[in-house]
Amino acid sequence: MKYETLTVTLENHIATVRLNRPDKANAMNATMWQEIRKAFQWVDATPQARVAVLQGEGKLFCAGIDLQMMMGLNSQIQNECDARTREALRRVILDMQDTLTSLERCRKPVLAAIHGTCVGGGIDLVTCADMRYCSAEASFTIKEIDIGMTADVGTLQRLPKLVGDGITRELAYTGRKCLADEAQRIGLVNRVFDSRDALYAGVLEIAASIAAKSPLSIRGTKEMIVYARDHSVADSLNYIATWNAAMLMSKDLTEAMTANMTKRPAVFKD
């Protein structure tokens, strides 16, 4: 597929999705919102893609939502009926939420490699990833409060599950910067790398280790972790029992056990 605001590549079972508006600090315009969803639908549907890495071109990872897009919303939703105007705005917000949820919906793990600044909508985006990693100079800011709005596409719903309620409130109420070392300490990122090059090399190594595992088992593991986040332990145990009743007796299981016994690398079907 061709994209205006992204570059998407696939090599050695690793799909790399790069935000590609470096001259605009990768601000998320209307086209990018649609293309992010298309890209992760493609990752989900492509058997050869076993894991995805999300990056940003240029000096910054993402400056958040494009303000020109925000300013143009009025003309997009305007209706002589006030209720219909507000309904149209609600549908725009729901559609933007759905774009970011496409990362969670994608059956393949998504690893975010964050450098420089990650602001506003960029936070919404990376909280949808399975794991987040950053370079030492990275910073994170929930900026919506400083432009007079409540963050509405996922940060306030997902971030508390990652860093806890109190830290989320502080970051969301104050709009202050969270630097890389704090981001690791609070659990927003898994690891901090010394440089951008080290970040990309380290995340690629992690992605490669995931790509070498049973694709069916990785997809099931992601399904279970996401489900367990939003359901009770009892419901989640019931779901995994049903899931494995259907998925456990796979060729991947036989291949993994045989490879372990013969001390050779396992080779799995996409």
Image (cartoon, rainbow, N blue to C red):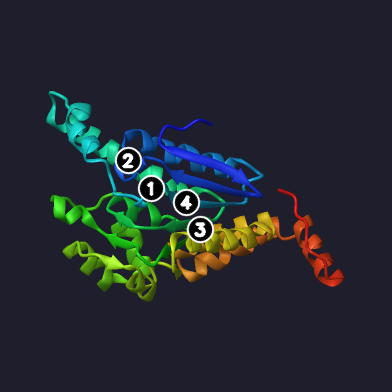
Which disc, if any, is residue 23?
2
Label 1 Cα crowd, 10 Å radius (few <14 / some 14-19 / many 20+): some
- Helix, strand, or loop for circle 3? helix
Q: Give the image location of residue 200, x and y in percent.
A: 51, 58
Q: Nearer the viewer, mark 3 or mark 4?
A: 3
Residue lying at 34% horizontally and 39% vertically, measured from the top left: 95
Say what amino acid the circle numbered 3 marks: Tyr
Question: What whole-number distance in Å separates the C-alpha atoms at marks 3 and 4?
Answer: 10 Å
Q: Nearer the viewer, residue 233 or 42?
A: 42
Label 1 residue SS:
loop
- Depth check, front residue: 239 or 50: 50
How far apart marks 4 and 2 lie (CA) works out to 18 Å
Q: Residue furthest right?
A: 262
> Which one is earlier in the sequence, the residue at label 1 or at label 2?
2
Q: Tag on residue 200?
A: 3
Q: Residue at x 52, y 41 (%)?
A: 8
The residue carrying mark 1 is: 58
Image coordinates of residue 79 in percent, x first then y, are: 16, 25
Seen in the image, is 171 located left or right of residue 47?
Answer: left
Provide the residue designation for mark 4.
54
Dot 3 or dot 2: first in sequence order is 2
Quarter of the image containing the N terminus? top right
Q: CA–CA distance between discs 1 and 2?
A: 8 Å
Closer to viewer: mark 4 or mark 1: 1
Question: Disc 2 residue type?
Answer: Asp
Asked whether the residues under the numbered discs 1 and 2 touch, taking CB atoms below 8 Å apart as contact, a structural biologist would say: yes
Amino acid on which the number 4 mark rests in the picture: Leu
Q: Amino acid at mark 1?
A: Gly
> Would residue 163 appear left or right of 14 to someone viewing this image?
left
Depth check: 13 or 261 in front?
13
